[in-house]
Image (cartoon, grey):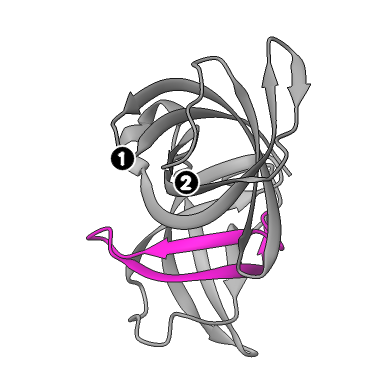
């Protein structure tokens, strides 16, 4: 039985060891949903067979957290058995540090679109299965504002839509907790 009905082929994946230390960031070459494994091309050269892994997968439907085990290396690809997809209410335990530069290209305030004259520079500090934390030094936003966020991960353009649900404003920087609404 498959761990998920989603296809992860072509998705971005962050792979962590059992101590939650990032091993690699790569993309998924293929996903066999019948036998519950994915294949990645690189980044696991120093990982022992049968090592327990934690994976955060960024796919067209959002993000998913699964457990995994390195099965082996075949035809130039590392096979990882996957199981135990995490529930979205476990997000605080599954928050992953990113620190990736991004831009806000459009805002929606009271359902009205507002495009800034210049894209707003931000940093995505972390990502979970349901949300993200962003930081900016130049702009303040209100709770309830929807944002279109654009960034590059592994050479791929990623567009996120998120709603600001909490804020931490200081003189030199502002941090905003956002709920993910949609991922392109």
- Between discs 2 and 1, the one toward the N terminus: 2
Residue 112 appears at what percent x and percent y?
76, 15
Dominant secondary structure of the residues highlighted in magenta in the image: strand
Residue 1 visible in the displayed image? no
Residue 129 appears at what percent x and percent y?
48, 38
Disc tally is: 2
Label 1 environment density (alpha carbons within 10 Å; few <14, some 14–19, many ≥20) = few
Q: The magenta stretch spans which residues? A: 8-32
Tell me the quarter of the image containing the C terminus: top right
Query: The residue tagged with tag 2: helix, strand or loop?
Result: strand
* Disc 2: which residue: 65
Front-most of residues 83 and 147: 147
* Disc 1: which residue: 172
Q: Is residue 20 left or right of residue 140?
A: left
Q: Is residue 8 left or right of residue 130?
A: right
Residue at 28%, 31% in the rendered image: 170
Q: Is residue 114 left or right of residue 70?
A: right
């Amino acid at each position: 039985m498959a761990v998920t009905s989603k296809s992860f082929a072509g998705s971005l994946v962050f792979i962590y060891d059992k101590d939650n230390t990032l091993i690699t960031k790569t993309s998924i070459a293929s996903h066999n949903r019948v036998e519950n494994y994915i294949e990645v091309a690189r980044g696991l050269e120093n990982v022992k067979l049968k090592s327990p892994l934690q994976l955060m997968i960024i796919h067209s439907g959002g993000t998913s957290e699964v457990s995994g085990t390195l099965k082996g290396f075949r035809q130039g690809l590392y096979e990882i058995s996957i199981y135990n997809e995490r529930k979205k209410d476990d997000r605080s335990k599954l928050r992953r540090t990113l620190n990736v530069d991004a831009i806000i290209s459009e805002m929606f305030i009271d359902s009205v679109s507002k495009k800034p004259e210049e894209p707003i520079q931000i940093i995505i500090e972390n990502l979970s299965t349901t949300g993200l934390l962003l930081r900016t030094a130049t702009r303040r936003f209100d709770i309830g504002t929807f944002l279109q966020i654009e960034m590059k991960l592994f050479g791929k353009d990623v567009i996120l839509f998120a709603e600001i649900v909490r804020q931490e404003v200081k003189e030199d920087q502002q941090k905003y907790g956002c709920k993910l609404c949609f991922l392109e």
